[in-house]
Image (cartoon, rainbow, N blue to C red):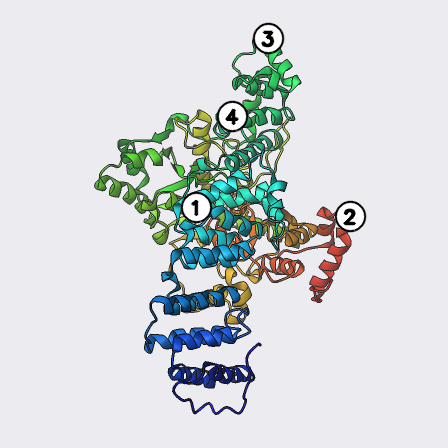
Amino acid sequence: MDCPAMNTETNFSTVTEGQDPLHLLNSLYTLWTKKDIQKLRETATSGFAALKEPLDGILIMLENCGDLRKGKGHSLGHYIVTEFQDWIRTNPVASQTGMALKQQQCRAFTIVIESQANLLEPLISVYQLDQADRAYLLEQVSYLSERGRYKEAALLAIKLNLQKDLNMEEICTPLILQDKANIAEAFVANEPDLQRRLVQMLDSWCDSSFNTKNFIRKYQGTSPLKTEKMNHKVLGKLVFRLLELYDIDPALCPNVVKQRHFGTLKFLLYRRFVEKDMTEENWADHIEHTVGQNRWLQDQLVNQLVRYDLRTAARWAYHYKLPLDTLPYEVAVKIQEMQLNDCGGILSRDEHQQEGLEDIENDYYYQLPLPLDRVCFVGTLEELQQCKSVVLQPGQVVGIDMEWRPSFGVLGKSRVALMQLAVRDQVFLLDLPELLKKVETANQQEEFSSFIQTLFTDSSITKLGYGMSGDLRSLATTYPVFASVMQHMQGLVELLSVHQQLQKRHSNNSVTGSRVVDVLSATASCQGRVVRQPEKGLSLLVQHVMGKPLNKTEQLSNWEKRPLRKAQIVYAAIDAYCLLDVYNTLLQNPDRFGVDLQAVLLGKQGKTSKEEKAKSKQKTHPTPAKEKCESSESELVTSSSQSPIAPKEFHVICDNMLQGLGRYLRCLGVDVKMLENDDDHRKAAEIARTEGRVILTCGLPYQTLRSQVGEGRCFSVPCSEKAKDQAVRVLKHFNVLVTPADIFSRCQNGDIAGSLKFLLCWQTGSELTSQ
């Protein structure tokens, strides 16, 4: 510390009026080194009062402190100025004016620059720096920026409200290259024009003609330079987050939107030609919506299709009227052949691919046991009244589901477009967007919301759902008028919880060797058909209970497009009606399935004893010692209350922060999917809902993800733990029983030895953190 010589014999109790600032600094320094905070505060307070010119005296003390570059709370200089800031509030001193004030402000700015902006806020308050000449303030910011101190320049500009007078690109570009996008965001906060310019600048970096190397060369002297931040995926993710944060029209960022649509295009091709779980109609509908009139995307569609189906590539090239000389040679030739053969509609399905397919699918999949004329589309208030009179009957049992158009990661939240209500002899499909358009008066709106409110809160009406909490959250997000539904919900049977009971019972029987009826085995078969993907979610439950799965090829339809196709209407009706059949079958065969439906009926549990409540509270509220690392687990069932399950029955999706954990679990036979590094956390919720997986995450994303999936379907592990320890925590919590046979089921090459060692450590309770 570059302070004057310190006199350790100073008598701190005697401070005279007009005390020399350096003498006071000496005194404070001695107490600072001794960490005598109480005496330090007393001496500072009396010393400030004894200074002849307090404002000048504080500047002299700061100019002679050598520790100004230390962080807040770690330097004597920061302590002095913050204590003075507090003292001056109760002991006002005469402020300087004119030239004297300008001189003080000039000296204060010099101290700010020397202190790496650590003293900026208190000095602004004490010396009215925000009232200084604006040209002079801008000069100070430019001085910092020219010397590569971009963070300090941005913070100074923010505190002094100078953003509008500065070049946003010159300030924010180096910040983003230094991985300090949060400061760039703070720079444009509350400035809509700067926000638009920022996202447009980032979007311009994603243009195919943008020369990244030449651009980065301008900032080679900047340290540390994170050149990987110029990756299009990273930039695209940042831009989309800012577009949503600032509510900016995506049309301002054509390059990023185009790249995102291209990603959607590849995903749709994968679902259609690899997983084969989309019908051609809804696939084509999404392709049209994604590609639109963008010529680049049209070309990319054709080029990508060549890898999968040449005929389909030719049909789409013909549909978009792409010039033959711009197409791949084999596509141009195929178009000419199709024209000669007069193949018909360019987007028509190939008859030889569809011949007999519907009969095969009808035999394989669960079918709607009602004629189609018993499925009523509700789009008017009169039709809604008819629906209400049927559904709101005491003792009624209603299967409920909801549909919305998938967003495929593109900006904007999908809104609930359809609510399906199924009773024993009828299914109602509520067109929510259209109905809400037609409730013009306050009374009509109240009547509509009252219908939904009564449906979900009337305990005399049994509601059947699968992952209903997630559906209701989406409903409340889309239509705030229904936001209070979840707060008073009663009489809901959550069949997702029933499904979990079935899976645990099956796993328990597998472990104990019990010879009971295997209700989880696939009982359906279809001659001549190969099941491409294993069933999951509701489809798997229906297969377990009814013997046949659901046909999910319409799941990713555009549910906002009207009119709905017949296949969409059938799919929507089945998704709600199958809940009735599953529920009734479980009720009629309690011994076979061994599921306690009463235990999962919300709002009808009845009163519990004080002892039961105490036990429940003890389970759901961990002790303070455990709360630190298990705060997110309070809503989950503890491992001691679960039956053991086999790793192959444990299906998880790991957030991109837990890829190490995912690899360990995979080596132990667990069915693991992992997000890519550039995937949004919310993708985990989408996968979890569609595939019936448990989300494994950590940190802040947990709260968001937990709200998007069913209760107990999201688990947070401590970020600070190593992957091995995280794996132990997950296995113990979900009571996953691992055997050597499980280890060899998924791991490859050198992973086997490591997994065996890991299993041995876990079972023997050895230390896992050592390598």
How far apart are labels 1 and 4 at the CA level?
A: 36 Å
Query: Residue 371: x and y, percent?
Result: 41, 26
Q: Is residue 106 above or below residue 463?
A: below
Check if mark 3's residue and mark 1's residue have beta carbons within 8 Å.
no
Element type at mark 4: helix
Check if mark 2's residue and mark 1's residue have beta carbons within 8 Å.
no
The residue carrying mark 2 is 749
Query: Residue 325: x and y, percent?
Result: 61, 16
The residue carrying mark 3 is 341
Q: Is residue 96 above or below residue 259?
A: below
Residue at image point 70% right, 64% down: 768
Check if mark 1's residue and mark 4's residue have beta carbons within 8 Å.
no
Query: Residue 698: x and y, percent?
Result: 55, 56
Amino acid under disc 1: Gln
Amino acid under disc 4: Ala
Mark 3: few/some/many CA within 10 Å (<14, 14-19, 20+): few
The residue carrying mark 4 is 284
Count how many numbered circles sit on residues in the image: 4
Q: Nearer the viewer, residue 416 or 637?
A: 416
How far apart are labels 3 and 1 at the CA level?
A: 55 Å
How far apart are labels 4 and 2 at the CA level?
A: 42 Å
Mark 2: few/some/many CA within 10 Å (<14, 14-19, 20+): few
* Residue farthest toward the front in the current orientation of the protein: 99
Q: Nearer the viewer, residue 320 or 654?
A: 320
Is residue 502 in view from this perspective? yes
Q: Earlier in the sequence, mark 4 or mark 2?
A: 4
Mark 4: few/some/many CA within 10 Å (<14, 14-19, 20+): some
Q: Earlier in the sequence, mark 1 or mark 4?
A: 1
Q: Quadrant of the N terminus?
A: bottom right
Q: Earlier in the sequence, mark 3 or mark 1?
A: 1
Q: Nearer the viewer, mark 2 or mark 1?
A: 1
